[in-house]
Amino acid sequence: METADVVVIGGAVTGASVAWHLKAARRFWGRVVVLERDPAYAKASTALAASGIRHQFSNETNIRISQYGTDFIREFRGPDCEGLSFRENGYLILAGDEAGAAALRRNHALQRACGADVALLAPPEIAARFPHLNVEGLALGSLGLSGEGWFDNMALLRGLRVGSQAAGAEWRRDEAVGVKMAGDRVAAVRLASGAEIACGHVVNAAGTRAALVAGWAGIDLAVEPRKRTVFHFTCQTPPAGRLPLMIDASRLWCRPEGEGFIAGIGPDPDPAVDHDDFEPRYAEFEETVWPLLAARSPAFEAIRLTGVWAGHYAWNTLDQNAVIGLHDACANLIFANGFSGHGLQQAPAVGRGIAELIMDGGYRTLDLSALGIMRMEGGAPNAEAGIY
Ligand SMILES: Cc1cc2nc3c(=O)[nH]c(=O)nc-3n(C[C@H](O)[C@H](O)[C@H](O)COP(=O)(O)OP(=O)(O)OC[C@H]3O[C@@H](n4cnc5c(N)ncnc54)[C@H](O)[C@@H]3O)c2cc1C
């Protein structure tokens, strides 16, 4: 039977980052095989994301993960990658009441203590910086001054994949369909093609399908697909200036994209959906997105819808944060799942951390244990105060 030291299930941004950190960054001696069922990435969250990165989290681990992400995104070059087109325009997070403002202030203190370049803005300061915004009803804003923005998601994925291949990782178009267990270890991964690969470690980087992979090892993983619809529009009179990714008090988000903008909002209700259901929820635009946009800016009153798509979050139902590392029930299946709405920016630090788990037996640079999978068993959430 074929053998590999590491089999990575899922070759989108998380799996690619694991392979890149193992082979290109750390020169791992062993054989690494990345399995990807759809190299076109038609349904991968990675390809359907808004591609933002922020330091404005309420959880220190997430802040530090994104700080490494920013350094990585700024500097990344590869055999097939000249850079990631990082638009460092910041996130502007708005609070509409005193409770929201208090959360922003608390988060700000932690972010500053971690060295994040963020500023709190009173409503008149928001209006001075972004004159198109209607600040009525706002209590406070928080703006990333550097290190935050958005970047080319597919350039990152391609760069990691090609870079890892150049360093010896083997990429294969195939689907993992099960595992063979030997006691508390995965002995081999079974493939749709009929092949089996005996393995040292397995990395679950299967995105919204992560719970299926976990189930093969007898582990229940509370991660499910949740649909997010993204709307692209142009404005009759576009607002000028260097505009950030805005997260309104309503949780509507909006950022510049090309000649226009993209925007979306988490729906309510927000049920789990079928893995293959990518039908956009068109009605959200008229019912929620457009009215909220128009209320926040007169520039968003006269707009034309120019595109729409739907993607899936891999939604961690416990706390909407990443689930990383080994589970007590299986000695060699490493999880990198449940990123909900922020896995693209976390891929560099998570890939590095998993490479350390495999090569060093523990985290060496940034301790990711606060995001360990065993918290899912104890039901002890590690949730963000605010945004997913
Ligand atoms: C609308 C939207 C907006 C977003 N905006 C942002 C954002 O602004 N910033 C941010 O950081 N994140 C954002 N995200 C989240 C981010 O896209 C994801 O967290 C991240 O891309 C997850 O990457 P992944 O590689 O873990 O999973 P995925 O990209 O879902 O990839 C999983 C891969 O595994 C493959 N696979 C699954 N099962 C198997 C199997 N059995 N065998 C072989 N291959 C398999 C799949 O084909 C897929 O390619 C957004 C997501 C969406 C949907």
Image (cartoon, rainbow, N blue to C red):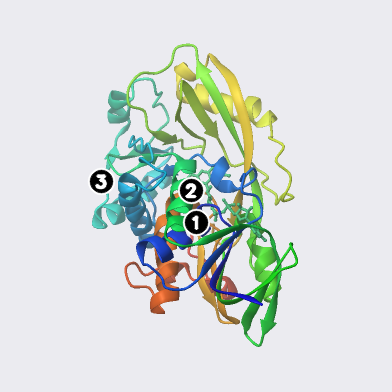
Q: Quadrant of residue 355?
A: bottom left
Q: Residue at x 56, y 43 (%)?
A: 47
Distance from Cα at disc 3 to Cα at disc 1: 29 Å
Q: Are marks 3 and 2 in contact (CB under 8 Å)?
A: no
Given the image, on which type of amino acid does mark 2 rest?
Answer: Leu
Distance from Cα at disc 1 to Cα at disc 2: 7 Å
Q: Nearer the viewer, mark 3 or mark 1?
A: 1
Q: Position of residue 113 (x, y in %)?
A: 24, 57
Determine the secondary structure under disc 3: loop
Q: Which residue is mark 3?
A: 117
Give the quarter of the figure containing the N terminus.
Answer: bottom right
Determine the secondary structure under disc 1: helix
- Residue 156's place in the image compared with 301, above or below, is below
Q: Which residue is mark 1?
A: 16
Observer-nearest of 203 and 50? 203
Q: Are marks 1 and 2 in contact (CB under 8 Å)?
A: yes
Left or right of residue 74: residue 276? right
Residue 384 in view: no
Q: Which residue is mark 2?
A: 157
Q: Is mark 2 within 8 Å of ligand 1?
A: no
